[in-house]
Image (cartoon, rainbow, N blue to C red):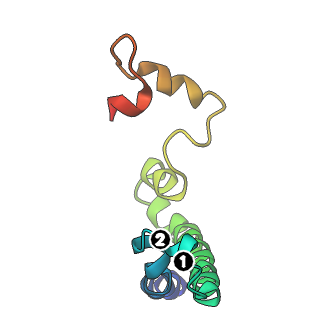
Amino acid sequence: MLAGIFFIAAAVAAIIGLALEGPALNESRYIVAASGDDARVILGAFFEVILAISVIGTAVTLFPTVKRQSEGIALAYVAPSGSLSKDSKPHLSRLKTRPGSTLADAR
């Protein structure tokens, strides 16, 4: 029940946040034009924080249920792969790049 509430709150916050931040994200001259919609963007950022809290709440409340089936999948849902390990940076060294190229070119 609580996971469902977090999930719905995340969906609603994502939609409202994107709608409020739309002009700042899509307008190429938003900052230069000083359109005065700063309160709208700040409110959109607030909904993005609500979204983040809701996503974390969903993962944490679902963890015990998913853990009964597979602890690995439960951990993968709660934390992105590699973020908990101390040696997450060496994973970048496995990317194959050409001499003179950057990691951004590898995408």
Nearer to me, 63 or 49: 49
Measured from the top left, where is residue 83 in percent x and y? 58, 42
User: Given the image, on which type of amino acid does mark 1 rest?
Assistant: Ala
> Which residue is labeled 2 in the image?
29
User: Given the image, on which type of amino acid does mark 2 rest?
Assistant: Arg
Q: Do the residues labelled 1 and 2 touch (CB within 8 Å)?
A: yes
Report helix, strand or loop for mark 2. loop
Looking at the image, which residue sits at the far front? 33
82 vs 4: above or below: above
Q: Residue 33 carries which label?
A: 1
Report helix, strand or loop for mark 1. helix
Please name the residue shown 43% across and 80% down the image. 22
Q: Quadrant of residue 37?
A: bottom right
44 vs 83: above or below: below
Q: Residue 73 carries which label?
A: none
Please name the residue shown 53% across and 58% down the image. 78
Measured from the top left, where is residue 38 in percent x and y? 63, 84
Please name the residue shown 48% across and 68% down the image. 65
Measured from the top left, where is residue 46 in percent x and y? 64, 82
Q: Real-space Cα distance between discs 1 and 2? A: 6 Å
